[in-house]
Image: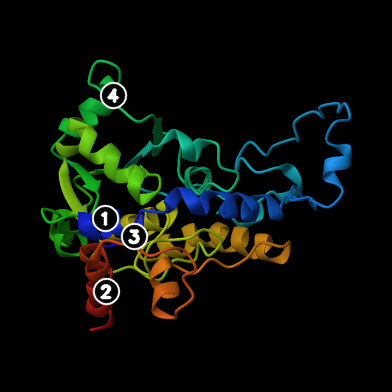
Amino acid sequence: MSSRFNEDTIEEMNEDDDEDEYEEERNERAGDGEDDEDEGFSVLSDLPVERSERRPTCRRCCRPVKVCLCPYLPPRPLDVSTCLYIVQHPAEESRVLRTVPLLAACLPPGKCNVFVGRRFSEERYPELAAVCKDARTLLLYPGAGAENLEDLSADFGAATAHNVILIDGTWSQAKDMFLRNALLRLPRQVQLRSAPSSQYVIRTQPTNMCVSTLECAAVTLSIVEKNHSIQEVLLKPLQALCSFQLQHGAQIHHSKEHLIKNGQYNKVMPKNKRKIRRMQKLITNQNI
């Protein structure tokens, strides 16, 4: 997810999302000892292999026990009145390094609800439909019609508990889910006017303004709950996760915007002149 973007920006910066998947999967496996050398593998590939049992997984952080992140989680769930609803693309569910389980582990039961899918109808998802129709519900998704969350502080108080919906997926996946699901266009749409640079450095982001779902939730909760310490608590396990992966072979992923600015973007640029001008305009505007 991101702080503030128009739909054209999201589309342009995600044209090659799928091409980054392989490199990111290698990053994800590095810290867990699953990225084996290719040399000599072809000699052994035809030999019968016994499937080992699934590694024990920590029930709280959903990480393998040997790389458990529970020491970096708060000793007790954060006391929040806001309910989060994560609408998650199925591809995110299979990722090794997911941020949503860490987010859920920091919050009380029932405060972080996850719905996995691409299409959400009222018939199949009555609970989500009820939340979308609730006047207290906010959808965090940038766009021309979105209000800045920071400007709504007067709406947040102890008397009213809000719901916040976040879309979990790549930018292209999030855009597709937003446009194809009428339910997601019912809540009041908000965006983050500003957010710190992403600390989720082991996954490529479209631009420097993009942040992970956990980071979006951390900033959002700190604003809605009027408690800035929430952000620090929620980011601690993410920082530990990235630090561990980098120590075990993962590589830092700069944003596509950063690579383009510094002449390090090694993928083919769009041939369409209009698309090139849009990308150049994006970078110029963000330097102002």
Three-letter code for the amino acid on which mark 4 is drawn: Glu
Residue in front for this viewpoint, 267 or 71? 267
The image shows residue 79, relative to residue 233, as above or below, that is: above
Residue in front for this viewpoint, 139 or 265? 265
Looking at the image, tell me whether mark 2 or mark 4 is earlier in sequence order.
4
On the image, numbered disc 4 is attached to which residue?
127
What is the crowding at mark 4: few (fewer than 14 residues within 10 Å), some, or many (at least 20)?
few
- Quadrant hosting residue 129: top left
- The span from disc 3 to disc 4 (Cα, nearest Å) is 33 Å
Looking at the image, tell me whether mark 3 or mark 2 is earlier in sequence order.
3
Three-letter code for the amino acid on which mark 3 is drawn: Met
On the image, numbered disc 1 is attached to which residue?
224
- The span from disc 3 to disc 1 (Cα, nearest Å) is 29 Å
- The span from disc 3 to disc 2 (Cα, nearest Å) is 11 Å
Residue at image coords 56%, 61%: 202
Badge nearest the viewer, 2 or 4: 2
Q: Mark on residue 13?
A: 3
Badge nearest the viewer, 1 or 2: 2
Left of 116 or right of it: where is 188? left
On the image, numbered disc 2 is attached to which residue?
280
From where the camera sits, is residue 212 visible?
yes
